[in-house]
Amino acid sequence: MHEEQRQRAHDLLRARGIDYALFTSSATVAWLSGFAPPVQTGPNLFAGGPPLLWYAGGEWTLIVLDAHAEAAAASGCSVVSYLGYTIAEPIDGHGKLSAALQQVVGTAPVRQIAIEQHNFPLYLRALLPEQATLIPIDGLLAPLRLIKTPEELVKLRANFALTDVGQAAARAAVRPGASELDVWSALEGAILKAAGQRVPIGNDCTVGRRAHRGGWPLDVTILPGDSFVIDLSTQLGGYWSDSCSTCYAGEPNSRQLAMHRTVSDALELAISLVRPGARASDIDQQVRAFIAAAGYPVYFHHTGHGIGVSGHEEPRIVPYNDMTLAPGMVIMVEPGIYFPDETAIRLEDALLVTETGAEVLTRHSKGM
Amino acid sequence: MHEEQRQRAHDLLRARGIDYALFTSSATVAWLSGFAPPVQTGPNLFAGGPPLLWYAGGEWTLIVLDAHAEAAAASGCSVVSYLGYTIAEPIDGHGKLSAALQQVVGTAPVRQIAIEQHNFPLYLRALLPEQATLIPIDGLLAPLRLIKTPEELVKLRANFALTDVGQAAARAAVRPGASELDVWSALEGAILKAAGQRVPIGNDCTVGRRAHRGGWPLDVTILPGDSFVIDLSTQLGGYWSDSCSTCYAGEPNSRQLAMHRTVSDALELAISLVRPGARASDIDQQVRAFIAAAGYPVYFHHTGHGIGVSGHEEPRIVPYNDMTLAPGMVIMVEPGIYFPDETAIRLEDALLVTETGAEVLTRHSKGM
C-alpha cells in the first residue's frame, strides 16, 4: 500500500541528501503508509504518542501500538509494535514506545535525522542518538501530496460515495419540527451503514440562519421556510471527503429560489474554470465576482481547497494563492450566499483535475 | 471553572519550588481549566498544536486557537488566542501559536520551566527562553486528580446520565436481524439528543461472540440467541463516562442465564467491596476469585479503573495495584465472562467512593 508515495518521498529525501528521517505528523504517516488510527475518541490512552514512521535510506518502519499492529502491517512497511494496555504492570506507553524507537534506530553512527518538529514529542529527542543533528523538514513532503496517485483516487472516490449517501439521508430528514441533531443522526446512521464501520464525520449541519458561523448540529428546531446547510466530510482509510448541499423545510421562497440558482450557477462556473494551468486566485476571484455581480454579499470563506489525508490542504482556492492547477489534483469548490440570522445556501463539489478540465467526484443532489 | 483544581496544582507546584510551567497534555489542561476542544474529527487543522496552559506563580493563561477563545474563556483563566483559519494569507497555526507563546512567556529572566515532555511539541522549545532549564513533570499532577471536586462530580453525573440514555436506546434496538451498526446508530442518536450536541462516544457495541476482542460496531448481523455487549463511554465538558450492560436477541438460554446471574453477583460483590481503605488489588482478586469459584474462565481485563478527564486512570483495579481507595474517588467496576466465538457478558457500574462505602452513579439496566 502507498508504494508510490514512499517512492516519491524517497526520491526527494535522497535528492536532499537525507539518509534518515522520523515522521511524526499523522497526515504524513497516513500519506506514506496508508495507516491512520481512529480519531473519534481522541488520542489512544495507552499509546506513547502518535504512530511513528522511521526512514533509513529507502527502508520504512512503522512504530505503532500493539492494538494497531495488524492494521499497520497492511501498509507494506516493516512494523514494530509496543505494549499498550496491560493489567500485568502499570501502563507505560511512553516507556514502551521509547524502547521500540531505540530498537529501530539502533546504534549506527547516524549524523543527521530529518524530523517533523511540529509533531515531534520532546521526550523522544533523548531516544535518538545524542550526536545526531535534527533537521526540521515540516512540510517538505506536502508538495508531493498535490498530485493524487491512482490508489489515492480509489480511496477518495469511496469516501465521496459515503458523503453522497449522507447527503441523501440528510435531505430526507430535513422537515419543519425536526432538529439539526435529528438530521445528523439520520445521515450518520446512513454513512455508518454504507461504510460498514464507524467513520469520523465532520463539518456543518445547521439551519441556514446560523450557517454563517458554521458548526456542528445542535438541538435547534427547523422552522418552516428554513434553508438547511449540509456540509459533510468523512474519513476512510486515512483520506477525507467533503461535500455540501442546501435544502429547504417546505418550499423555498422566491428569494431563496433566486439565491439557490445563483449559487448553483456559481458552482457551475467554478467547475468550468478548473483545468490544468488555471490559477487558484483567478478561480477564486471569478467566482466571487459572479456572486457580487448577481447583487449578493460575497462569501467570507475560501472558494475551495485541496483534499486528501487532510480535509483542507493545497491547492487552496483563495485570493492570495497563485498556485496553478495540474492533472491529478483533487479540489473542492464551494460558493455560498449568507444573510446572517436569516438564511444561507452553500453548494460544494469535489473535482479531479483531468488533462482537459475537471471530473466531478461527488454525486449528491445540489438541487432544492 | 475548576478553581479548586488550579489551587491544588498551585500548592503542589509551589511546594516543589516551581514558579513556571507549561502544560501541554490535553488531560492536564482539561483538568486545570475545564477547557477541552472537540476530538471527533482529529486535531484541528488550523491549530499550531494542542491548547497550552502557562503557569506563572499562580497566574494561569490558556493559549488557544481563535475559534476556541470563547469556550476557553469560561475557564476563568486568562486567554490568549491566535489566528487559525484565514483566507487572507497562508494558514500558519505553528507560527501564530509561536508568537502567542512568546507574548505570554515574555522576556522575564525565567530560570526553570516545568513541562510535560510527553506532549510537548519540539518546535515550541525554541520559543521558551534559551537560558531556561526545562524540568519534566509528566504525571506530577495525576495524583491530584484522584479525588474529584464537587464541580467534577456534577460533570461526571451529567455524563453518566448520557450513557444511561444510550444504554436504554441500545437495548431497545437489539433484536435478531439488526446489525451492530443499527444498535450503534440508535444509541448515538439518543445520546446526541439528550446532550443537545455531538459528543465523542467510545467503547464496545458487539455481539457477545466477538466481545472478547472488544471493539467498535461493524456490519455484523445479530443472530437469535446472541448476547450483546454494550460498553459505552461519552465525553462531555472534558470528562468521560463509562458503563456496560449485556442484553439478548430473544430469550437468553439457560447457560447465558446462569452466566448473567454470576456476573451480576460479581458486580454486586465488587460494589460491596468498595469503601475507603479498600485495596485495589484485593478487590480485583476477590472478584476474579468469585468468577473462578463459579466455574467460569476469569476475564482477561481489569476489574475496573478510575475515570475523569481520562477514560481510564488511577486507581486501576488490577492485580498489581496496592493503591487504597479514598472518599471522592470515582471508579468503574466491570466483571465479565467470555467464551470466545460463542457468547459473552459484561456488566459495569460507576461508583463514587463515599465515607462509608460506594454510591452507584450509573442507572442503566444490568438485567437480561
Image: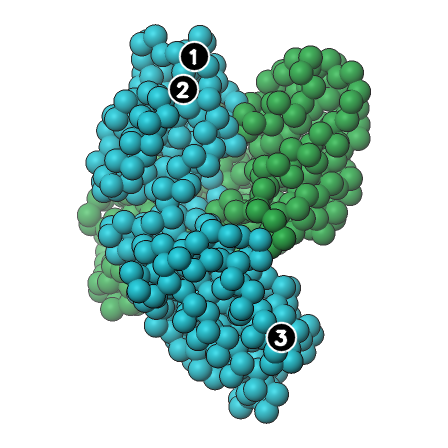
Chain colours: A cyan, B green
Mark 2, residue position: A113
- Where's residue A223, x and y in %? 61, 83
Specify whether disc 2 shares its chain with disc 3.
Answer: yes
Looking at numbered disc 3 in the image, what kind of residue is underneath it? Ala
Nearest the eye: B151 or A43: A43
Looking at numbered disc 2 in the image, what kind of residue is underneath it? Ile
Q: Secondary structure at mark 1?
A: loop
- The chain letter under disc 1 is A
Earlier-in-chain disc, 1 versus 3 = 1
Mark 3, residue position: A292
Q: Secondary structure at mark 2?
A: strand
Is label 2 in contact with label 1 (beta carbons under 8 Å)?
A: yes
Nearest the eye: B290 or A212: A212
- Where's residue B187, x and y in %? 44, 62
Q: Residue at x 48, y 84 (%)?
A: A368
From the viewer's perspective, is A17 left or right of A184? left
- The chain letter under disc 2 is A
Earlier-in-chain disc, 2 versus 3 = 2
Is label 1 in contact with label 3 (beta carbons under 8 Å)?
A: no
B203 is higher (above) or lower (below) than A167:
above
Mark 1, residue position: A132
From the viewer's perspective, is A106 left or right of A303? left
Specify whether disc 2 shares its chain with disc 1.
Answer: yes
For marks 1 and 3, give the CA distance. 56 Å
Q: Tell me the crowding category of disc 1: few under 14, some 14 to 19, or many 20 or more residues within 10 angstroms, Cα based.
A: few
Specify whether disc 1 shares its chain with disc 3.
Answer: yes
- The chain letter under disc 3 is A
Q: Residue at x 58, y 42 (%)?
A: B92
Q: Residue at x 74, y 27 (%)?
A: B105
For marks 2 and 3, give the CA distance. 51 Å
